[in-house]
Structure formats: C-alpha cells, structure tokens
Image: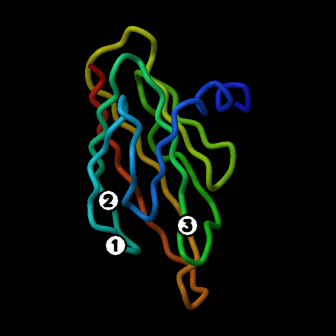
C-alpha cells in the first residue's frame, strides 16, 4: 500500500473540508461542506493522471475508511490525512468510489462525512 501511495503522490490536489484546488490534469467540483452528511464530488482525470487529496478539518481527522473501492483505478490512504486516486493506465470512462472521514468538530465531538466520488477519465 505504501508503494502504491508513493507512486500516486506525484500530483497534488488539496481538499479542505469539501473545498479544494486541483492540478491542471485533475479537477473536481467544490460542493458546499456539511458535517454529518454525504457529499457528492465530480472528479475529472486527464491522461491517466493521479489525484492526491489532503483532508483537513478544523478539529483534526480521527479516521478515514474506504466504503466503495473504484473498479478502474486505485484509491489509497496512507493515513487519515493523505489520500490518492490513480486511474488504471489507458482507461477512459467512468469510475466511482466512496470514503468516510470521521473528524473532530470545533467542540471536540466526533462527526462523520461520506464523500461520494464520481470520476470521469478522458
């Protein structure tokens, strides 16, 4: 897993509580953040690129869990903060994966958010 994550770490994509910035060959929608809910994110990956995510929440991340693995790529999380998605080489089309982040809110209570990622690779 660490080897896979190391390979994916080349392209940076910062995600801050549902809002982020992307490298030129990896873009995604910026939905409004809502604690304790599910968020739909549309990701476009060009040329078999990798996308790297950095989860940042005000109180800190407790855990990150993959709920649905992608069928045409790899989703990896080396720890609760550093996440990455890599489409299979040569694949063009749709993919999907989900992950859950448990984090501490500003008052120290645990919150859960599910991020549902629809990927288009072109």
Per the image, the residue denoted by label 2 is 39
First in sequence: mark 2 vs mark 1: 1
What residue lies at 62% left-to-right and 43% top-to-bottom? 77
Q: Looking at the picture, does residue 6 appear above or below residue 80?
A: above
Q: Looking at the picture, does residue 110 appear above or below residue 77?
A: below
Per the image, the residue denoted by label 3 is 102
Q: Position of residue 91 (x, y in %)?
A: 35, 13
First in sequence: mark 2 vs mark 3: 2
| CB contact under 8 Å: marks 2 and 3 | no
SS for tag 1? loop
SS for tag 2? strand
Per the image, the residue denoted by label 1 is 34
Looking at the rendered image, the disc whose residue lies closer to the viewer, 3 or 1, is 1
| CB contact under 8 Å: marks 3 and 1 | no
Q: Nearer the viewer, residue 78 or 102?
A: 78
Which quadrant is the N terminus positioned in?
top right
62 on left or right of 14: right
Answer few, some or many: residues within 10 Å of disc 1's Cα (few below 14, many 20 plus, some between 14 and 19).
few
Of the numbered discs in the image, which one, if any, rests on residue 98? none
């Amino acid at each position: 897993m660490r080897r896979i994550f190391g390979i994916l770490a080349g392209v940076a994509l910062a995600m801050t509580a549902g809002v982020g910035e992307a490298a030129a060959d990896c873009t995604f929608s910026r939905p409004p953040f809502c604690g304790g809910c599910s968020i739909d994110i549309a990701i476009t990956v060009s040329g078999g690129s990798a996308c790297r995510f950095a989860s940042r929440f005000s109180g800190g991340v407790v855990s990150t869990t993959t709920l649905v693995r992608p069928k045409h790529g790899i989703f990896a999380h080396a720890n609760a903060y550093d996440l990455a998605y890599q489409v299979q080489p040569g694949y063009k089309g749709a993919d999907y994966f989900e992950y859950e982040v448990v984090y501490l809110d500003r008052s120290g209570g645990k919150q859960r958010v599910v991020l549902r990622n629809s990927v288009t690779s072109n």
